[in-house]
Image (cartoon, grey):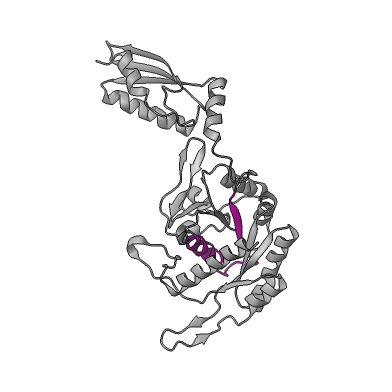
Amino acid sequence: MLTEEKVLNLLNGLEEPFLHKTLEELNAIQEVKVKKEKNHVSVKIAIAKTGTAEQLQLQTKVVNLLKEAGAETVGIRFSELPEETLSKFRTEAGSNDKGLLSPESKTTFIAIASGKGGVGKSTVSVNLAVSLARLGKKVGLIDADIYGFSVPDMMGITKRPVVRGEKIIPVERFGVKVISMGFFVEDNSPIIWRGPMLGKMLNNFFNEVEWGDLDYLLLDLPPGTGDVALDVHTMLPSCKEIIVTTPHPTVAFVAARAGAMALKTKHEVLGVIENMSYFESKLTGEKEYVFGKGGGRKLAEELNTKLLGQLPLEQPDWNEEDFAPSIYQEDHKLGKIYRDIAQNVLNTLEAK
């Protein structure tokens, strides 16, 4: 038979969802009543924020725990913890988390930009992030192309982020922590938003995600010089940029606008990556310059920066058991080129 003491012992060890302390530590169980004749238990619990999904999750845990212990019915009321308790434990919880945008942050931001779509900017973003992780760096990746999000699919990510307290926990894949609008959209639905809403979501990606300690946070920007790119330039005054182009002169000409925007907003252009530089026949070894030559080098000269690397046209090796359609294996020819580009980026940053 359940008693008030037994109920307290059962519930005291549960964790409050926002402050990550036990209910006992917070003195959060404010009332327990047991009606023995009806085998009914009623409890009143204080938490940091009521009317939330976290409250519902805790409620489910309490009900299941008490019914497993023998209660036939359970009644729960929630209230909010006193302000002095909130202040005390929020200070403790936040003392080690200054945030990515704080002056104390040591994270280097690298935005991957292009003048137009279709040049493989997202492919470069995911493979550069993975290559930096392979070099032993702590890496995060924001899929900031909010209309054209593709990073989760490219990296073969099937999980979604979970919420812990008031923070979103990014999904980790190939050693890279990832957040994307794609995680929050059902069935590949289109995003019909105006500029201010895009900026708000981007701000949430910086401030509402529990990134932990990162060496580098990469941002896969939308192509062009629109609202999201402008928001990034405003939010991250010390952001570095890499411009992706193809060898085609028109593509490089358009990409120059993205580079010029970076320079005008005091962002440093680390270099240019030329994608789809050529196609090499596996039969003859002959190189075909499908999109012409020289666009990447010319763009680098125009932006007074370096050409970080040239990537040929070639498909990754697909592993059906660990499917990631756009990630090159470390021993793949392009995987090795990406590793060299990542090392080039690190050398460039360390030389500054």
> Quick check: can you spot residue 259?
yes
- 130 or 349: nearer the eye? 349
> Quick check: can you spot residue 113?
no
Q: Is residue 319 above or below residue 56?
A: below
Q: Position of residue 319 (x, y in %)?
A: 35, 66
The magenta segment is: 106-132
Total count of labels: 0
Report the quarter where the C terminus lies.
bottom right
Q: Is residue 127 magenta?
A: yes
Q: Position of residue 332 (x, y in %)?
A: 42, 72
Residue farthest toward the front in the current orientation of the protein: 351
On the rendered structure, is 81 left or right of 244? Answer: left
- 280 or 147: nearer the eye? 280
Q: Residue at x 54, y 69 (%)?
A: 341
Q: Residue at x 56, y 83 (%)?
A: 289
The quarter holding residue 25 reads top left
Q: Position of residue 146 (x, y in %)?
A: 58, 54
- 62 or 9: nearer the eye? 9
On the rendered structure, is 333 left or right of 309? Answer: left
Q: Is residue 137 magenta?
A: no
Q: Position of residue 296 (x, y in %)?
A: 63, 75
- 105 or 178: nearer the eye? 105
Residue farthest toward the left in the current orientation of the protein: 1
Report the quarter where the N terminus lies.
top left
Q: Is residue 292 above or below residue 18?
A: below
The quarter holding residue 90 reads top right
